[in-house]
Amino acid sequence: MDERKTARVGGRDGKALTVGYIRAGHGEPLVLIHGVGMNAAVWQPQIERLADEFDVIAVDMLGHGASSLPPDPASLSDFAAPILALLDHLGIERANLIGHSMGALVAQELALTAPERVNRLISLNAVFRRSPEQAKAVLARAEGAAPAQDPDALAATLSRWFGNPVPLPLVESAALAGRALREVDPEGYLRTYRLFARADGAHGERLCELAMPALFMTGQHDPNSTPAMSAAMARLAPQGRCVIISGERHMMTMTAPDRVTAEIKAFLRDKASAAPRPLTPSTEGHEPLDYRRALGTFLTGVTIVTTIDDSGTPRGFTANSFTSVSLDPPLVLVCIGRQATTYPVFTTAKSFAINVLAEHQKPISSVFASKVADKFADVDWRPGVTGSPLIEAAVAAFDCDMEQRIEAGDHMILIGRVRGFTHTSAQPLGYCRGGYVSLGLSQEALADTSADMVVGAILEDDGRVLFFKTDSGDYVLPSGRGLGSASDPQSLHGRLAARGIDAELGFLFAVWDEAGPAPRAHVYYRGTLNGAPRQGHLIPLDDIATLPIVERPVRAMLARYVREREQDTFGIYAGSAIAGQVRRLVEPTSS
């Protein structure tokens, strides 16, 4: 633990105040401001990780640790002024500010009132424009007793921060937070909390005045400092950026110090301006109907583009104008029409997400293409790393910072820098000539075909393919008589279910007819495994060529799979067991 220090500084009314602090490290000054009920020592995980690059000053807020009591009633400026005076006392002209919860409000106040003293601002788990329900709950807590005086209040606070019961990996962090809450001066706590309970809108009209790059970061599961709040603040700040730490709650600085501090370092190291780029002047014109029909012949996927508006409300629209722009850096683009009801929202958005829909999500596409007031009412989603909504069960999702906007005719091109992405092997939803289309041979249709048809799958997990070993020592792929269902023990689905194998079938890969006394068709899909199988053997791609596989067509099919897997360019084989043709789904491009 670094040595605690105190300084006597002047308050707002000229009265001397004591400010406690911890100082460690060297480099560019970095001030850390804790939340209600804590003290400078709770920043120890960050001090240890930042002191090699920064001159870290962790401050005790008024009413906490070794610092004097705040006035009653207090204002945010009452808390900000002593920190500014401490910087004067230490001879520090400019510093970076990091505040957590109530400390984030204090840091914002300091950045707005003395912008010439602040290089960069980081608000962790900050509150902003609480809902009526949230406001009612926090005001009720402000009228109660301090946790140091009320065991029930202490237990309720720790439950909000860490969960109830506290997960085993978080027990130590919860114990440290509980100790701080028991040690804080009850009067200092209550004076501070009463301000915290009513200050969530203090900067609502002023964040647009922030003159420095600002990062707003919170935990995915923080119920009171929600991802929507951080996304809304980042949207209002001219150089704002939002980061959501997945799986974390309010005390993420303690429970996920490596992840939180890595984001802090990345933001502080990035000296490039985050200011929005100027827009290209727009042009006017109208698309002829025939031109629209011609464009409609291009087969596309269907996406939902989402963001959070400045009130914290999720917004989105349906789009099929989506494409990759660059791999390094990772850039993608999507277009939005000027007539879209969400157009004004996306002209000022700092981030957005592109969700590629699966075949079964056709109803979602229709809802977002409509003028329904609340398009998210029946849609399951979670915040991405930027705070933008990621739709559950989508084939893929690309979570982006806004890189550039370009006005082009009656649309605006939104270019995003990808911050995170997910993808599955589910069938994507296609769109062509004004209607939805299926991109592969319908598995539903196969389910009703003759049981004489062999349906199999090449199921992959991280570069390994699932095989079963026969009594004679040969290796075979999962297959069955027809696609069937889990209740049909002879079908592919039935045999997979009997072995406890959870798999997702994707695109069609090969179809061939087998001649002979009992001719039958063979159909094979590509697919992925969801988790490690309880039975079977996972064989690396490089080892498949040496496996004892009796059926020649299957050996040839697997050799093609390995080649096309390396090139990431798959086709569909159609023919007989002896000869046929591979039709490419995507032709390789030449440089």
Image (cartoon, rainbow, N blue to C red):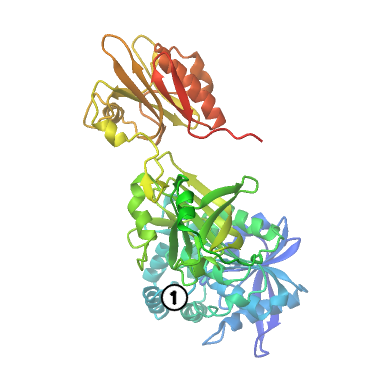
Q: Nearer the viewer, residue 372 or 267?
A: 372
Q: Is residue 25 above or below residue 362?
A: below
Q: Is residue 409 above or below residue 510?
A: below
Q: Residue 64, how many percent across, how many down? A: 56, 74
Identity of the residue drawn at 66% across and 76% down: 83
Expressed as whole percent of the image width and height from the top left, the position of residue 122 reads 61, 66
Considering only vertical position in the picture, is 542 above or below 178? above
Q: How many marks?
A: 1
Find disc 1 in the rendering and name its residue: 146
Q: Is residue 323 visible?
A: yes
Amino acid type, callout 1: Ala
Asked whether, in this view, residue 422 is left or right of residue 263, the answer is left
Q: Residues within 10 Å of mark 1 (few under 14, many from 20)?
A: many
- The part of the image, by quadrant, that contains residue 502 is top left
* Residue under the image location 40 percent in, 56 percent down: 381
Q: Which of 356/463 is in front?
A: 356
Residue 567 as seen in the image, left or right of residue 81 = left
Residue 389 visible at all: no
Measured along the vertical axis of the image, is residue 454 above or below residue 349? Answer: above
